[in-house]
Image (cartoon, rainbow, N blue to C red):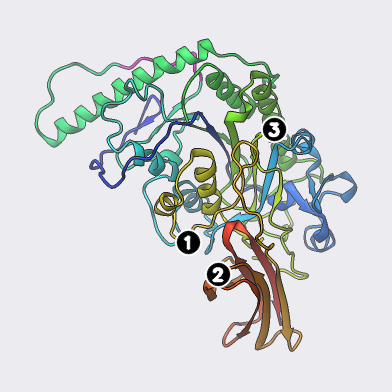
């Protein structure tokens, strides 16, 4: 049930969490790319271009039309605005973000990304909802108040975001027009009866009162704010981000904003006869124009150092295109961050494309999305790593994503290097895996082409130096497999092994 954009849920009050400090003025803006964005079409690895031409030639952007941004990577030609943002050092890309045991259902995978749960478990709270609840375990009882007069999160659009779902209520409100928020009636002031019905009625009235109070604060911020950038009127995402900048400049202390761009389920018509045109091109231009305008506005308003923007989508698409000029549900894809405080450039390496991938095969995961979430919580919202592990998962591995405004030192650690030495070649039963590490925890595992972790070879602390692991295949059938090496501080490497 939604009440003026405020989600209601009758569940017991939680006492699981303790308080976490939330005193900085930083803001996180999430852009949800609904439908499953084709990461290979958005950011094309130039060092894998020839292989891509063999398996998705009917949709692949001609190499001469791509926007080369260095790092052996190129943007879709419709993203010329974001190319400028990237060149200014205000954009970061994390390669091949996903999760083990990928679920290719829109609904289930969205649940996983918004809750931060493992693929094998169903969680009813959002990853940001749990973060907020650690500091505000009694919410919404007693809110807003003198210490927290503003909504904790806002969704720009008609549906409240599940990322902010707590155990008792959602910490987010959904709004369309910050200048036109309707005041709701509580339906009387009689004392509710001491029955389950009366308890629900009391909760409903509490929520209405909180919603009305928050609405007044939001409208005041909208009236006190301004925009200095130019936003396209017919770009709905740009208009959502325009309102975000307006409310931040107006003094609203909301920590999280969520906006949405849908239409990425491009099974057919992803491109037209000209691969640079079509549905995907239009969506990426909408995204590029909106984010570019937003970043310009934040800079002109003098608030860009307070805001980081991050994209997410429920999954990427498969490596092979289909006969309908489209792509089907896949696994990992690039995740983008924007802002003057992000660590610019690319984290991770080009996804390795098999010479002859199966129809079902998709980009292998390099980075677990929960490591991205947790690293943002640590660097941007100053959450302790132990709390991040409790909020997300115990195997959390930090990734340095913020630079300049809050630098996290990772100097002196070797890069993630992974060498595969098959014997005999092609690999049949025995294969040697070489890698280097510092004195740190190491996890080395085998994945199949569906993103399922099949076997963990190492999961422990190793001494600094070069290591060689011999893997004997007992029962794996023929196909494509991946070795994934994960070190500390987010250093990760995925290597493809084609087994015949």
Q: Residue furthest left?
A: 194
> Camera-side residue: 476 or 415?
415
Q: Are the residues tagged 1 and 2 within 8 Å (C-beta)?
A: yes
Instruction: Check disc 3 and report the residue beneath it.
Output: 286
Q: For the residue carrying disc 2, how many other residues have a C-alpha within 10 Å: few (<14), some (14-19), or many (20+)?
A: some
Residue 482: quarter of image:
bottom right
**Is residue 140 depicted above or below 123 in this figure?**
above
Task: Choose the circle earlier in sequence order: 3 or 1.
Answer: 3
Instruction: Check disc 2 and report the residue beneath it.
Output: 443
Element type at marker 3?
Answer: helix
Specify the quadrant that holds the C terminus.
bottom right
Task: Choose the circle earlier in sequence order: 2 or 3.
Answer: 3
Q: Say which residue appears at 68% left-offset and 63% top-offset.
A: 414
**Is residue 164 depicted above or below 423 in this figure?**
above
Q: Are the residues tagged 2 and 3 within 8 Å (C-beta)?
A: no
Element type at marker 1?
Answer: loop
Horizontal placement of 12 versus 468: left or right? left
- Could you give the CA–CA distance between mark 1 and mark 2, rounded to whole angstroms? 10 Å
**Is residue 322 depicted above or below 456 in this figure?**
above
Horizontal placement of 178 versus 144: left or right? right
Q: Residue furthest top?
A: 223
Q: Position of residue 449 (x, y in %)?
A: 63, 69
Q: Is any atom of residue 331 visible in this view? A: no
Instruction: Check disc 1 and report the residue beneath it.
Output: 395
Residue 417: quarter of image:
bottom right
Q: Which residues are magenta?
A: 177-184
Q: For the residue carrying disc 3, how many other residues have a C-alpha within 10 Å: few (<14), some (14-19), or many (20+)?
A: many
Q: Are the residues tagged 3 and 1 within 8 Å (C-beta)?
A: no
> Camera-side residue: 320 or 136?
136
Specify the quadrant that holds the N terminus.
top left
């Amino acid at each position: 049930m939604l009440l003026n954009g405020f989600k209601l849920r009758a569940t017991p009050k939680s006492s699981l969490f303790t308080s976490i400090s939330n005193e900085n003025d930083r803001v996180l803006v999430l852009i949800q790319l609904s439908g499953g964005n084709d990461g290979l079409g958005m950011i094309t690895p130039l060092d894998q271009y020839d292989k891509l031409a063999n398996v998705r030639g009917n949709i692949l952007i001609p190499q001469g039309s791509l926007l080369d941004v260095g790092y052996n990577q190129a943007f879709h030609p419709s993203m010329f605005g974001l190319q400028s943002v990237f060149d200014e050092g205000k954009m970061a890309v994390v390669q091949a973000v996903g999760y083990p045991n990928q679920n290719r259902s829109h609904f289930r995978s969205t649940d996983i990304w918004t809750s931060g749960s493992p693929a094998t478990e169903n969680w009813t709270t959002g990853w940001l909802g749990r973060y907020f609840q650690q500091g505000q375990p009694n919410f919404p009882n007693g809110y807003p108040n003198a210490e927290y007069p503003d909504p904790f999160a806002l969704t720009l659009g008609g549906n409240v975001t599940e990322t902010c779902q707590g155990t008792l209520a959602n910490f987010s409100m959904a709004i369309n027009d910050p200048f036109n928020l309707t005041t709701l009636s509580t339906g009387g002031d009689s004392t509710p009866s001491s029955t389950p019905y009366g308890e629900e009625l009391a909760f409903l009235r509490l929520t209405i009162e909180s919603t009305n109070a928050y609405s007044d604060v939001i409208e005041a911020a909208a009236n006190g704010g301004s925009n200095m950038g130019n936003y396209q009127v017919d770009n709905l995402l740009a208009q959502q981000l325009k309102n975000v900048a307006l409310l931040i400049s107006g003094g609203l202390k909301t920590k999280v904003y969520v906006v949405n761009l849908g239409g990425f389920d491009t099974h057919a018509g992803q491109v037209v006869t000209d691969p640079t045109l079509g549905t995907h091109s239009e969506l990426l231009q909408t995204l590029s124009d909106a984010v570019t305008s937003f970043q310009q506005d934040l800079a002109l308003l003098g608030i860009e150092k307070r805001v980081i923007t991050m994209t997410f989508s429920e999954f990427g698409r498969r490596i092979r295109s289909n006969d309908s000029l489209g792509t089907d549900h896949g696994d990992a894809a690039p995740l983008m961050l924007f802002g003057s405080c992000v660590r610019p450039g690319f984290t991770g390496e080009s996804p390795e494309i098999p010479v002859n991938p199966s129809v079902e095969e998709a980009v292998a995961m390099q980075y677990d999305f929960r490591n991205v979430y947790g690293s943002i919580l640590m660097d941007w919202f100053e959450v302790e790593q132990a709390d991040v592990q409790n909020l997300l998962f115990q195997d959390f591995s930090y990734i340095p994503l913020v630079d300049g405004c809050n630098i996290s030192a990772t100097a002196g650690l070797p890069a993630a290097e992974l060498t595969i030495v098959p014997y005999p070649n092609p690999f049949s039963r025995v294969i040697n895996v070489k890698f280097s590490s510092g004195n740190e925890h190491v996890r080395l595992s085998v994945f199949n082409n569906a993103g399922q972790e099949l076997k963990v070879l190492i999961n422990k602390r190793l001494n600094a130096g070069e290591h060689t692991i011999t893997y004997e295949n007992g029962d794996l059938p023929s196909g494509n497999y991946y070795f994934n090496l994960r070190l500390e501080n987010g250093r990760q490497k995925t290597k493809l092994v084609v087994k015949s």
